[in-house]
Amino acid sequence: MKNLKPYSGDNFSFHKDVIKRKNKRKNDPDYKNRVESLNNEIESQFEIYKEKFEANTLESLSAIGYNGSNKDDLQELYDYNSKLLQKLKIELTTDDNKRVNNTCQNCSLGEINSFDHYLPQSEFSEYVVNPLNLIPSCTKCNGHKSSIWREAGKRKFLNLYLDKLPEVQYLFVDIKIEENIIELKYFLDSKNGIDNEIFELLDYHYTKLKLFDRFKDNSDIIISELETEITKYVKKLPIEEIKETIIEECKANYKILGRNNWKLVLKMALVDNSEYLSRF
């Protein structure tokens, strides 16, 4: 999991470009006119959104409350497969080395195949194509998050544009080996001095997106890859040197994958487990 850089262009211009590129409907020729008639009101809402975004107080936003045909018309602006939204996805997922990372950063597991509307479009249809409200995501994370985003006036899920992830470790994994079977249990811990507010967001995010179970379910291939790597070196190097080599490789990948990437956390924990290493 890594932070993402938010859209750097003009957000309302993006909204207008989406409208401009919508195909005319044979059975509804007035569609564009109806949507454009809302522009003045929506533009002012975009300005408010940006102010709240920059102050990291999105939880204080109130929806216009569009319903009926206005809501339907606005929601129809969102088309993940449209050229503009695909271009946006590429921009948001391109790193400083000009490489596109197509892995969902909400989970570090799935392929990006949707945008999560951080403020749900069912409630805030005015932001349905606001780039600051669109976070590249996999559909599994999108489905688990659903329309939940705040409770009792507080945001519940991480916003990877706004919430700076701690640079210290907060994701851990317990390892138990019985009869040569490896059992894993992922969990979060704030023992390295993480701010309570960000830790609450982390805990809710990981729990509601079912990340602990999803990491565990995908761990077999990581364990197999690690065992192949260790076996390759075991006749050439002492086990302690192999351990240090793998640790250094993991640390070198922190910049690419993040300090708390579930794969790196698992590899580090395995090579630090004497019972696991005794198998080689």
Image: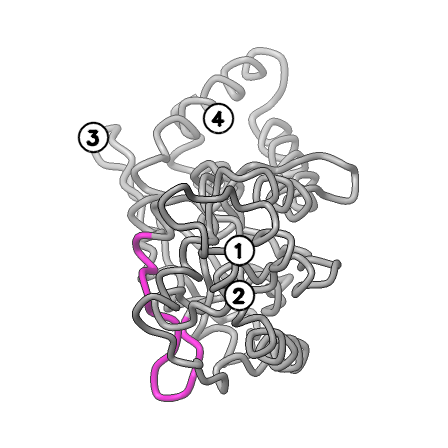
Image disc number at residue 135: 1
- Determine which residue is flagged by label 3: 179
User: Whole-Å distance between the Cαs marked 1 and 3?
Assistant: 43 Å
User: Whole-Å distance between the Cαs marked 4 and 2?
Assistant: 32 Å
Q: Do residues under tags 1 and 4 come within 8 Å of each other at their CB atoms? A: no
Image disc number at residue 226: 4
Asked which quadrant contains residue 52, the reply is bottom right
**Hey, what amino acid is under mark 1?**
Ile
Asked which quadrant contains residue 278, the reply is top left
> Which of the two discs, 1 and 4, labels the residue nearer the N terminus?
1
User: The residue tagged with tag 2: helix, strand or loop?
Assistant: loop
Res 259 seen here = no
User: Whole-Å distance between the Cαs marked 3 and 4?
Assistant: 19 Å
Q: Is residue 46 above or below residue 185?
A: below
Q: Residues within 10 Å of mark 1 (few under 14, many from 20)?
A: many
Q: Residues within 10 Å of mark 4 (few under 14, many from 20)?
A: some
Q: Do residues under tags 2 and 1 come within 8 Å of each other at their CB atoms? A: yes
Q: Do residues under tags 3 and 4 come within 8 Å of each other at their CB atoms? A: no
User: The residue tagged with tag 4: helix, strand or loop?
Assistant: helix
Q: Position of residue 243 (x, y in %)?
A: 58, 33
Does the magenta-highlighted stretch encompass residue 150? yes
Q: Is residue 225 above or below residue 188?
A: above
